[in-house]
Image (spheres, grey):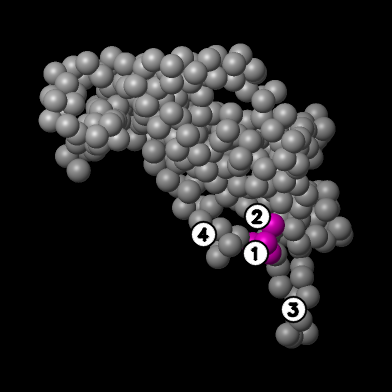
Amino acid sequence: MQGIRAFFQAEPTALAGTLWILLWALIALTSTLWRPDPSRHANEQHLEWSMLAPGATVEVPDVHAATLHERTFILGTDRFGRDYLSRVVAGSGLSLSVGLVAVLLSLLIGIPLGAYAGYLGGAFDAAVSWLLQVVWSIPTLLLVLALTLAFGKGFEQVFLAIGLSMWVEVARVVRGQVIALRNVEWVEAGRVLGLSTPRIVFLHILPNLAGPIAVIASANFAAAILIEAGLSFMGVGAQIPMPSWGNLIRDHYGAILTGHAHLALIPGACIVSIVLAFNALSNAFARQAAQR
């Protein structure tokens, strides 16, 4: 705890970014309990309430009594009369979950592959290095598009495609760091004592790479959110009626020059703010790792 406190005291921007990330994570986890439209994808449509301005209030009949009650739309409604606050909040769950799963998948593939390539060297390292160079030469978005089209459009395919496109950078960083450490005295001592390769790699070398891995993981989290937003904007990510910040922008970018510009600007601001928060965290990890 003291180390975490010292880290955030030295990096106030990282503290602000972490709090913003935790706030959105809390919103995503609890939104179905409090958002105005509690339906699965916040897809409750009322065409008679189409394109209401933020703060608009309508009178709704009470089915249990012969009275009317008022309903206020804090962020207004979209063209289908759906509560826009609920759509934005529901979209946060997809964006954050895609980032989390993609980062975990990239770490599960990239860390062991890069660690063993750096430690073992020889033919295995040459083969892994060749694979890294081939995959690295393909533009990330193009690779994600190819994987998405190969596996089909859909929610699960987005997770898989983004995760499989990010392991290369993790493997490159881990491989380089392990090469620098594989001949130090305490690693040589482990080999002399007869410790197994997995034990040396995972219990002795990788704990010393926590800083670089944290840097790449937080940066990849931000990149995954951007890639998912781009895929959804192009129509190959989250599919209707599932909301994501990317397809919310796609559905309303034409309204930027009208009186309903907030329909595109709000999800855009959400993407920008969460990416900046992860970048602030990544930069803080990098500065602290450089000081060690």
- Dot 2 amino acid type: Ser
Foreground tag (3 vs 4): 4
Residue at x-position 75% and y-position 42%: 153
- Dot 1 amino acid type: Pro
Q: Nearer the viewer, residue 36 or 182?
A: 182
Q: Which residue is mark 1?
A: 38
Foreground tag (3 vs 2): 2
Crowdedness near tag 4: few (<14), some (14–19) or many (≥20) residues, C-alpha within 10 Å: some
Q: Is residue 215 visible?
A: no
Crowdedness near tag 1: few (<14), some (14–19) or many (≥20) residues, C-alpha within 10 Å: some
The reply to whether callout 3 and callout 4 are in contact (CB within 8 Å) is no
Give the label on residue 30, or none: 4
Give the label on residue 62, or none: 3
Residue at x-position 77% and y-position 70%: 60
Residue stretch in magenta: 36-41
Above-or-below relation of 145 to 38: above
Crowdedness near tag 3: few (<14), some (14–19) or many (≥20) residues, C-alpha within 10 Å: few
Is 19 situated left or right of 210 in this image?
Answer: right
